[in-house]
Image (cartoon, grey):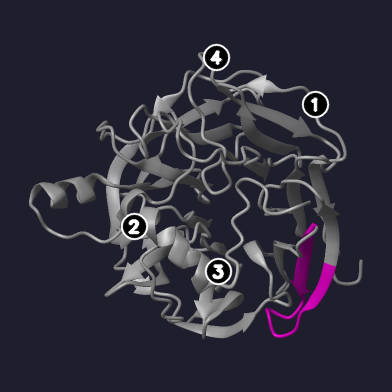
Amino acid sequence: MTGMRPGFRFIVAGLLACTALAGTAQTHGNHGNHGGQAKAAKMSELGTGAAFDRTGKLWIAYKDGPHVAVRSSTDFGRSFGPAQHVNSAPEPVAADHDSRPKVATGRGGEIFVTWTQPRPKPWTGFIRFARSTDGGKSFAAPLTVHANRDEIAHRFDAIAVDQSGRIFVSWIDKRDVVAAEARKQPYAGAAIYYAVSADHGKSFQGDYKIADQSCECCRIAMSPTPDGNMLALWRHVFPPNARDHALARLGADGTATPMQRATFDDWRIDACPHQGPGASVAPDGTLHMVWFNVREGKPTVSVGRWKDGKLQAQRPLDDPRAQHADIVALDNNEIAVAWKSFDGQQTRLSAMLSHDGGKTWQTTQLARTERDSDQPHLLRHAGRAYVLWRTEAEGFQVFPLAKEGA
């Protein structure tokens, strides 16, 4: 590999690269080549979502030309069945890393898929949703999740299902930016909205606002909580321009708790780093999180936990080049973190495991590639963690992470 592959957003030396981003990110969110953006640099389209269903079948969702496709595996990713198109009518589909198709599964065997549909105007999109109630054999016609249909940014969707089977979909939204501009008032970043389906995806209620002043193009992390709520974690713009993270609990009735600041690195920059956080709530209610920031002038991916209303046990990953990390909390105080890093020649996939709630960690290298790659995604099934990593050369790969004593 010579140089950086398209879509490979490693922030070299932190502030230097972020300064280069600032010229476009503040106005446009520094998004990729979507919709009518023919002059923008072409981005990787390897973005893939994944989830296990209740039977242990693994589902992946990805872009296949003007369609979203799903495939399933009954052997934990060693092989996949044929592709099934989710949207029968072709339409634009975003598939660049944080803005990739997503998949979630229901308690009754339903398959739920979301994606961003780029619109003709630059940096705009709609959040789309489709469901299968027959185990992925067929999908109903897609619907647009949000009630607002202005041709603005509704992008970077996230989906999660709570313990009652309700579907939560959140996204980054710029309707409030447009309204502020009309009033000739300043507005930093964008906003976070969500919608909820209580009928297994037949319809959604919403456009519920979580918070103003979110970062423009970092993914949102959502995780169900043991008490039946949904937790959201996102990169926020704290005055005057600190790109830290915030969290809130989302109610199915559209009421969200007041947001709380979750990280305190105080990275001040007028640009979006294109690296959203990861979040997973453990059975005891502790939020385990992983995130990228620049600390003391150094690009750093940190892992920590949110408990009793405060951030605890923050520490950097065992890799100074780490980026695009994900996290999952398992039973018995087990936590897994996965990330990729670029050494100038190869991209490496690595993982850290903790068997004591994050007090101690063991690091292992899982794979490497010399060509482009998607972000790694951590999955949970039957008390075990799995890493999905799609690469340009090797395709879809799934790596099981060892449990203690296994």
Q: Are the residues flagged by discs 3 and 4 in contact, CB closer than 8 Å?
A: no
Which residue is the site of mark 2? 26
Question: Which residue is drawn at the image coordinates 81% and 47% (left, top)?
Answer: 398
The first of marks 1 and 4 along the sequence is 1
Q: Amino acid at mark 3?
A: Trp
Is 261 or 332 nearer to us in this picture? 261
Question: Dot 4, crowdedness within 10 Å: few (<14), some or many (≥20)?
Answer: some
At horizontal 76% and vertical 52% (from top left) the residue drawn is 2
Provide the residue designation for mark 4. Answer: 88
Residue numbers of the magenta segment = 346-364
Question: What amino acid type is highlighted by mark number 4?
Answer: Ser
Number of the front mark, 3 or 4 = 3
Residue 308 drawn above or below residue 50: below
- Which residue, given by chain and number where applicable, does mark 3 sit on? 291
Residue 300 location (% of width, % of height): 59, 75
| Residue at the spot of label 1 | 81
Indicate which disc, 3 or 2, sits on the residue closer to the N terminus: 2
Q: Which residue is painted at 81% across and 40% down in the image?
A: 393
In the rendered image, the vertical position of residue 255 relative to residue 68, given as above or below:
below
